[in-house]
Amino acid sequence: MTQEWQASPEPLSEARVEEELRGLPNWHHDGDAIVREYRFGDAAEADRFLSRVEEVGRNVEHDPTIARDGGAVRLTLTTHDTGGVSDKDVKLARLIQAMTDEQATF
C-alpha cells in the first residue's frame, strides 16, 4: 500500500535539517541533500540491503540516489522539486534507519 507524504513546498531550513538529523545517527547534511554511507562484507550483502532500500522507496514513492562500489553504499536523499531537503527525505531516512536498526550487521 502506497503512503502519501506531505512534502514541504520549499526545502527545509538548514537549522531544521540539522535538528532532524540529530535523531538519525550517521546521516549528515551535504549541500542540498542528506547522506549516509554503509560498508558491507561484500557486494552480495550490499545488494541485499539495496533491494530492501528500493522496496521502502517504492512504498513511499520517493527513491534515494544510490552509489555502490563493491560492499560500499552511499545513499543520497534530496527532493529535486524543492531544490533541497524536504520532509519526504527526512521521512525516508527514518524508514531506512529503522530498517537498518533491525539488522546488527549494518
Image (spheres, rainbow, N blue to C red):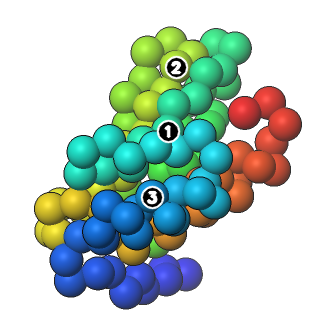
The residue most toward the front is: 15
Three-letter amino acid code of the residue under disc 2: Ala
Image mark for residue 18: 3
Q: Can residue 26 be seen in this snapshot?
A: yes
Callout 3: few (<14), some (14-19), or many (20+) C-alpha neighbours within 10 Å?
some
The location of residue 46, given as percent across then percent down, is 59, 26
Q: Residue at x 61, y 21 (%)?
A: 39
In the rendered image, the vertical position of residue 10 relative to residue 53, given as above or below:
below
Q: Which of pointers 2 and 1 lies earlier in the amino acid sequence?
A: 1
Side of 90 where 66 appears, left or right: left
Under circle 2, the secondary element is: strand
Q: What is the quadrant of residue 58 in the picture?
A: bottom left
Q: What is the quadrant of residue 45 in the picture?
A: top right
Under circle 1, the secondary element is: strand
Find disc 2 in the rendering and name its residue.
72
In the rendered view of the protein, which quadrant contains the C terminus?
Answer: top right
Q: Which of pointers 3 and 2 lies earlier in the amino acid sequence?
A: 3
Side of 60 where 71 appears, left or right: right
Q: Nearer the viewer, mark 1 or mark 3?
A: 3
Mark 2 touches mark 1? (CB < 8 Å): no
Q: Nearer the viewer, mark 3 or mark 2?
A: 3
Gap between marks 1 and 3 measured at Cα: 14 Å
